[in-house]
Image (spheres, helix red, strand yellow):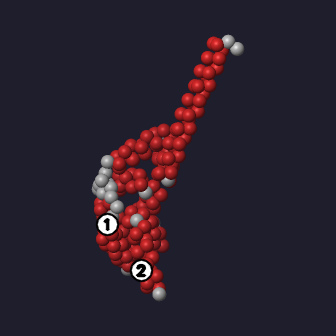
Amino acid sequence: MDNNTVLIAAGVIAVLVIIGLALLWRRQKTEQLRSRFGPEYVRAVEDTGSQGKAEAMLKARAERVRKYDLRPLSAEDRRRFSGAWRQVQAKFVDDPRAAASSADQLLGEVMNARGYPGGDFDWRLEDLSVHHGDAVQNYRLARDIVQRHARGDAGTEDMRQAMIHYRTLFEDLVGEAARAERAAETETTHA
C-alpha cells in the first residue's frame, strides 16, 4: 500500500469514528432528556411532531427553569402544607368539587413556596416538568377530570381519582419528609 492509500484509509476511518462518536453523544443526550422529563418527553415529541423540535423545546424549558430560585421547603412549610392537604382531603367527603379546587389552589401555593413563578396552567406544567416529569402527568390528568366534572361528564369516583393525581404531585413537590410524616401519623392512629 502506498502512503496516499494509507492516508485516505486513515481519513475515512477518522471520519467514521467522529460520526460514530457524534451519534453516540446525540443518543446519550436524548436518553438524558427522556430520563429527566419522563412521559413529558414523549408528549413533547407527539405535540411537535419532531424529536429535534421537542428536544430543543425541552432544553429551552430546562434553561428557563434553571434561572428560577427553586428551593426545598422548610420543615415548617412541609408541616403547614401537609396539614392543609389533610384538610383538603377531609373536605372531599362533603364536597368533592370544592376539595379538588382547594387541592389545585394548594398546589399553586406549594409551587410558589418552592420558587416557581405564577402563570397559567400550561406554563406551570412546563415548569414542573423539568424536575417532576413523572408527577406532572398526574397534574394534567387531575385538571382534566375536574374540567370534565364541571361539564357533568365525571362523577364522584372520577373526582376521587383526581384527588389521587393531585396528591401524587403534592407529595412529589413537598418531598420525602411529608411522606414520612404522613406514614408516622397513620401508624399512630392505627396503633
Q: How many marks?
A: 2
Q: Quadrant of residue 156?
A: bottom left
- Element type at mark 2: helix
Q: Is residue 35 above or below residue 85?
A: above
Q: Where is residue 50 drawn, in percent x and y?
A: 50, 40
The one of 92 and 25 positioned closer to us in this rendering: 25
Q: Residue at x 33, y 69 (%)?
A: 75
Residue in the image at 47% along x and 58% along y: 134
Packing grade of label 1 (10 A; few <14, some 14-19, many >=20) is few
Residue 169 location, x and y as percent? 42, 63
Residue 144 at x, y = what percent?
A: 43, 61
Q: Amino acid at mark 2?
A: Glu
The reply, left or right, for residue 6 in relation to residue 184 is right
Residue 11 to residue 170: above or below: above
Neighbour tally class for label 2: few under 14, some 14-19, many 20 plus, Cα within 10 Å? few
Q: Nearer the viewer, residue 164 or 76?
A: 76
Quarter location, residue 23: top right
The percent position of residue 160, horizontal first and vertical second, equals 45, 72
Which residue is pictured at 43% across the width and 45% down the height?
58
Q: Which mark is residue 185?
A: 2
> What amino acid type should be assigned to the residue bearing mark 1?
Ser
Q: Which residue is mark 1?
A: 74
The N terminus sits in image quarter: top right
Q: Earlier in the sequence, mark 2 or mark 1?
A: 1
Q: Residue furthest right?
A: 1
Secondary structure of residue under mark 1: loop
- Residue positioned 50% across, 47% down in the render: 32
Q: Is residue 133 visible?
A: yes
Label annotation for residue 26: none
